[in-house]
Amino acid sequence: MGRLPLAGITVVSLEQAVAAPFATRQLADLGARVIKIERDTGDFARGYDTKVHGMASYFVWLNRSKESLVLDLKSEEGMAVLKKLLSTADVFVQNLAPGAVERMGLGADEVLQMNPRLIHTSISGYGRGGPYEHKKAYDLLVQCEAGLLSVTGTEESPAKVGVSIADICAGMYAYSGILTSLLQRTSTGRGDVLEVSMLEALGEWMGQPYFYAEYGGAQQPRSGAEHATIAPYGPFPAADGTVFFGIQNEREWAIFCSDVLRQPELAQDRRFAGNALRVENRPSLHQAINDALSSLPAEEILARLDGASIANAQLRGMHEFASHPQLSGRNRWRDVDSPVGPLRTLIPPVTSRETTVRMDPVPELGQHTASILTELGVTHLV
């Protein structure tokens, strides 16, 4: 393996849960040395579940290729070690409670005075200032505050997104912001202060429904697994399961009627002349589609859709996803070592002709404490 893009970059992270660990794991994938500071009980995500041979699925996902350093940050000795690390680090990432790092003397101004080249990165629920600054922020709650649940779910009931999407998007913006600041530092020689809030990160992703409601006069309705503003687009029953497909334009609608439904005359039905009318008359539209397709096996429906170049998908659970032929066909799985043995995981989604990625073990709690302290010349804590 050649030199990785972030080789030589050191990241020190006071992180927990999802948002910050997701950002720093991606930095580690690119070769950065990520030193994860943990309390003696560890990142509480270590205890979220025990599904991965006794380890937590969240922790396994977010913490490969990192070094675990246990420090008591309430002690002078522990703080001295952390400050020594920060004095030569390139990036500091933290997602503690608002104000916590300032009370520890690790606010941006204090740390950059000690190390002007440091990129000081804070991830919080609602950001610095404003009435929500100190409000507790968990993923589902931020989904609510950003309006995501108002457009997700069925007409009768809202539903949360099934992954930690507010944490994930905040972590992604922290990751891209850090990369941008590292690039900027090559010309300025100076560090930076980055702040990412989960509300604002997820709010960026809510741009389309915001504009739809703000300038359209009414909010798009919750539509379950269907598309709120395009029809047909969503799930349809087959004789042995469920298939998904979507029509994007009138050319596709005509081909869909003739080649998939085998009812070319339906393309001339005035009720379905254009997407707006198909959305308005969705119940009748779905009835016509179900009458034509619901008695057919899913495999045949998908073959017809593929033959007509109509976008489609098979509804998969996690076990079916794990055996997806496209992922195996592109050799996207690797084994990563861990305290419970090798674990099969996806490699990062960005591929490069010039470099590869690092996928080193998931650390045990405090696994690297002794070696890091020795490296710093701190022997009395070892």
Image: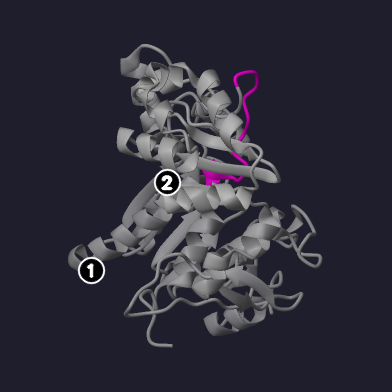
Q: How crowded is mark 1: few (under 14 residues within 10 Å), some or many (20 or more)?
A: few
Q: Give the number of the disc on residue 217.
A: none
Q: Is residue 197 left or right of residue 142?
A: left
Q: In this view, does 184 lie to the left or right of 268?
A: left
Query: Which stretch did the figure color magenta?
Result: 155-167
- Mark 1 falls on what kind of element? helix
Three-letter amino acid code at the position of disc 1: Thr
The residue at the far top in this view is 217
| Residue 182 visible (yes or no) | yes
Q: Which colour scheme is used?
A: one colour
- Report the residue at 49% width, 77% height from top: 358
Above or below residue 140? Residue 155 is: above
Instruction: Indicate the position of residue 58 as horizontal and vertical percent values.
Output: 66, 57
Q: Give the number of the disc on residue 186.
A: 1
| Residue 43 visible (yes or no) | no
Secondary structure character of the magenta stretch overall:
loop
Q: Is residue 288 left or right of residue 58?
A: left
Q: How far apart are marks 1 and 2 (CA)?
A: 47 Å
Q: Earlier in the sequence, mark 1 or mark 2?
A: 1
Above or below residue 176? Residue 338 is: below
Q: Relative to the observer, which residue lies in front, 300 or 47?
A: 300
Three-letter amino acid code at the position of disc 2: Ile
On the rendered image, what quadrant is the N terminus found in?
bottom left
- Report the residue at 64% width, 63% height from top: 322
- Mark 2 falls on what kind of element? loop
Q: How crowded is mark 2: few (under 14 residues within 10 Å), some or many (20 or more)?
A: many
Instruction: Indicate the position of residue 248 as horizontal and vertical percent values.
Output: 36, 37
Instruction: Residue under label 2, please give it.
Output: 310
The nearer-to-camera label among 1 and 2 is: 2
Q: Relative to the observer, which residue lies in front, 264 or 280?
A: 264
- Residue 297 belongs to the span the image colors magenta: no
